[in-house]
Every structure is written in structure tokens, then in C-alpha cells.
Image: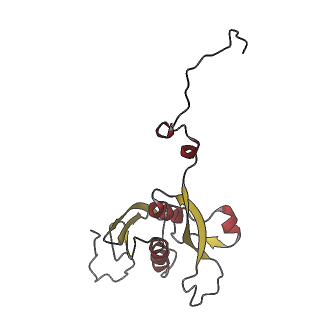
């Protein structure tokens, strides 16, 4: 190699640099395919799609697939899915946290400003979308859905006491 004033010398040895972020494997994030559930406008509701929810496959971070799946669920459909009349089943609600204990997924969501349920069935559609998304994971047998710290957020009965999430 011919030397000139632009020549840069480096000491570099080849080896396993996976902990430093240099390996080709580390550059590629490991993903896992999961199902999320979106609503379809004008869908025929039947026993298979009683709430109008339809399965959509997405790739998520394999290190925390449940959290990633629920986050993607709250993001809603991609532009191409919107063209197929699929819409969000979470109505602007965002994931706060999720944890698994004794095969039970405890999910916590928040309804930020501007988010609202568009009808009386919407809370149940939201719950079903979260449950279906979470129950696909082997370590989850039951799902608890909390919204802004309340378990029975769907209740319109003013006489029922508010059930707080633990």
C-alpha cells in the first residue's frame, strides 16, 4: 500500500466483538412473528369474528415479545392495512406496563388526552384485542387489563365501586 498524508493506521484484530456491537449478528435485531388484532370496518360479524377483530401478523423484538406486541397493538394499523379497512382496536390508548406472574399477564394502559371509546362496545373490543394478543404467548394463561388504574373501567354503573388495579 502506498503511503501519503491521507493514510490512517489502525490496530485492529479480528475476533468476537459481539459485546461491543461490532458483530453482524448484533447489527441484526432478533425478531419474532406475533399476531395482533385490529378491527375491520364493515366486517361480517360471526362466531369466528364476533367482535370484528381480525388477526394481523407483525414482527416484534424477540427479547420482550409480549411488551412489543402490546405496544404495536396500541400503534394500530400500518398504512397498507388501513387501505384494507383495518383500524385500531385500542382507540388511542397506550401501554404503560406489562408483567407476568404465575402465568397471568398484568397489563396497564392509559387513555391520554384525545383518546376515547367511540361506543358502548368499544371497551370490550379493546379488552378482547389485548387478551387475544397476550394469550398467544406460552407463559400466559390469563390476562388482567387495567386502564388508568381501574379494573372495571368498562362499567357505566355509578353504583358499582371502582375496582382498583393491584
Residue 69 placement (x, y as % from top left) = 50, 64
Residue at 68% x, 9% y: name it. Answer: 5
- Identify which residue, 153 or 9, lies in the foreground: 9
Residue 28 placement (x, y as % from top left) = 58, 48
Q: Is residue 157 above or below residue 82?
A: below
Q: Residue furthest right?
A: 2
Q: Residue furthest bottom?
A: 47
Instruction: State which quarter of the image contains the N terminus.
Output: top right
Residue 91 placement (x, y as % from top left) = 52, 69
Instruction: State which quarter of the image contains the C terminus.
Output: bottom left
- Identify which residue, 81 or 22, lies in the foreground: 22
Left of 44 or right of it: where is 158?
left
Q: Disc count in the image?
A: 0
What colour scheme was applied to this rendering of the protein? secondary structure
- Identify which residue, 35 or 13, lies in the foreground: 13
The answer, for residue 120, to whether it is visible in the render is yes
Residue at 71% x, 68% y: name it. Answer: 83
Residue 133 placement (x, y as % from top left) = 49, 72
Left of 43 or right of it: where is 50?
left
Query: For residue 9, what is the image quadrant?
Result: top right
Amino acid at each position: 500500500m502506498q503511503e501519503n498524508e491521507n493514510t490512517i493506521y489502525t490496530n485492529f484484530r479480528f475476533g468476537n466483538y459481539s459485546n461491543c456491537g461490532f458483530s453482524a449478528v448484533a447489527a441484526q435485531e432478533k425478531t419474532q412473528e406475533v399476531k395482533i388484532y385490529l378491527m375491520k370496518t364493515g366486517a361480517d360479524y360471526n362466531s369466528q369474528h364476533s367482535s370484528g377483530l381480525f388477526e394481523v401478523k407483525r414482527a416484534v423484538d424477540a427479547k420482550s415479545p409480549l411488551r412489543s406486541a402490546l405496544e404495536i397493538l396500541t400503534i394500530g394499523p400500518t398504512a397498507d392495512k388501513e387501505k384494507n379497512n383495518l383500524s385500531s382496536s385500542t382507540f388511542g390508548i397506550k401501554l404503560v406496563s406489562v408483567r407476568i406472574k404465575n402465568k397471568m399477564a398484568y397489563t396497564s394502559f392509559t387513555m391520554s388526552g384525545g383518546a376515547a371509546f367511540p361506543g358502548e362496545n368499544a371497551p370490550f373490543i379493546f379488552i378482547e384485542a389485548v387478551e387475544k394478543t397476550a394469550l398467544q404467548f406460552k407463559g400466559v394463561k390469563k390476562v388482567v387489563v387495567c386502564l388508568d388504574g381501574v379494573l372495571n373501567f368498562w362499567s357505566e354503573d355509578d353504583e358499582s365501586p371502582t375496582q382498583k388495579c393491584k
